[in-house]
Amino acid sequence: MTLDKAYRPDPDILDAFERDGYVVLRDAIAPEWRKEAAAAATRLLASDRMLGRDRSVDGKDGFRGIVAMDDTTFLPLVANPTVLPVVVALLSPNVYLMSSNLIHLPSMPPGAPRTIRVPERHGWHRDMSTATRDLGVDSVRRMSIKAAYYLSELSPDAGVTMVVPGSHTDTGPVIVPAGAIDPPGAITPDVGPYDVMLFENRLWHAGGLNTSGRPRLAVMMQYGYRWLAAIDDPAPELLQREGLSDIERQLLGRPDRHPDGSIAHEGAGAAPLRTWWEHLTPHPARLPG
């Protein structure tokens, strides 16, 4: 996956994202890469590695910062030519990769009591909740976009991320009726095995119920403005990797510096994506609402 295959984003896709807070991009990854990534993710999960491990009481397992853990496999996602133009169009060229998160969601055993997605803990949330707490819901704008890749077999019962379309513009929380686990209007997007779902930080979403009999394996790549703090642990060795393009170095967190290491003006580090975008399309990136 190289950026010479990138095209100007389809305006209909951008309009759909503006309206719904999410969009599904078709055929964003190759079948061969998906198979290799699933195998690499399975190896990581089977290891005894604890650095960056992300486990929870509901049985989820995974890692944060997987690009640094296996850059051979997951580095191609950083500047995915199907995804990156849409992200830049909806945010700006002044972005980078905040997090790369591997999530393993086990299937619930048949007949067992449900311990997740119960009415008392329905799981519906918005990302970047700290920003909402600090600034207030009326002040938070679109600041990040996640790209969700699903590496396991997909079916209606596989636990794909659910969303409430259009909820990114709501100023109040979603209302889940008493005794229910999903709010009115909640849907499971139609995501194919080679597709990627993009959604923004304000969109109300939740992990679906996985009753498929097999784990759901997903990778979430979160892009945000370069002035936002990274979520993953620092991985300076990534920037030393040979063969990286300037755009990849920007997305991996290269700061505002001149070639000699001295301080450059604020925002100078976004020059690679800014220049690329100007050659890709004469249209400026949209201002987030």
Image: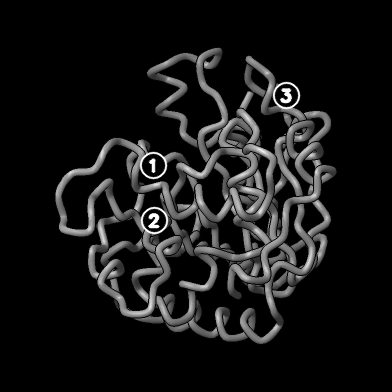
Disc 1 to disc 3, C-alpha distance: 41 Å
According to the picture, the residue beneath numbered tag 2 turns out to be: 250
Which circle, 2 or 3, is nearer the viewer? 2
SS class of the residue under badge 1? Answer: loop
| Amino acid bearing label 2 | Gln
Given residues 218 and 96, the one toward you in this image is 96
Residue 111 appears anywhere in the view = no
Q: Which residue is mark 3?
A: 178
**85 relative to 140, above or below:** below
For the N terminus, the image quarter is bottom right
Task: Say left or right for 134 vs 32.
Answer: left
Distance CA(mark 2)–CA(mark 3): 46 Å
Mark nearer the N terminus (2 vs 3): 3
Where is residue 192 drawn, in percent x and y?
Answer: 79, 66
Q: Amino acid at mark 3?
A: Ala
Camera-side residue of 69 and 288:
288
Residue 289, placed above or below residue 238: above
Mark 2 and mark 1 in contact (Cβ < 8 Å)?
yes
Q: Secondary structure at mark 3?
A: loop
Quadrant of the image occupied by residue 174 = top right
Give the amino acid type for the residue marked by disc 1 in the picture: Arg
* x 64%, y 58%: residue: 83
Residue drawn at x 61%, y 54% is: 279
* x, y percent for residue 12: 85, 43
Of circles 1 and 3, which is in front? Answer: 1
Residue that mark 1 sits on: 226
Quarter of the image holding residue 153? bottom right
Q: CA distance from mark 1 to mark 2?
A: 9 Å
> How busy is the neighbourhood of tag 3: few (under 14 within 10 Å), some, or many (20 plus)?
few
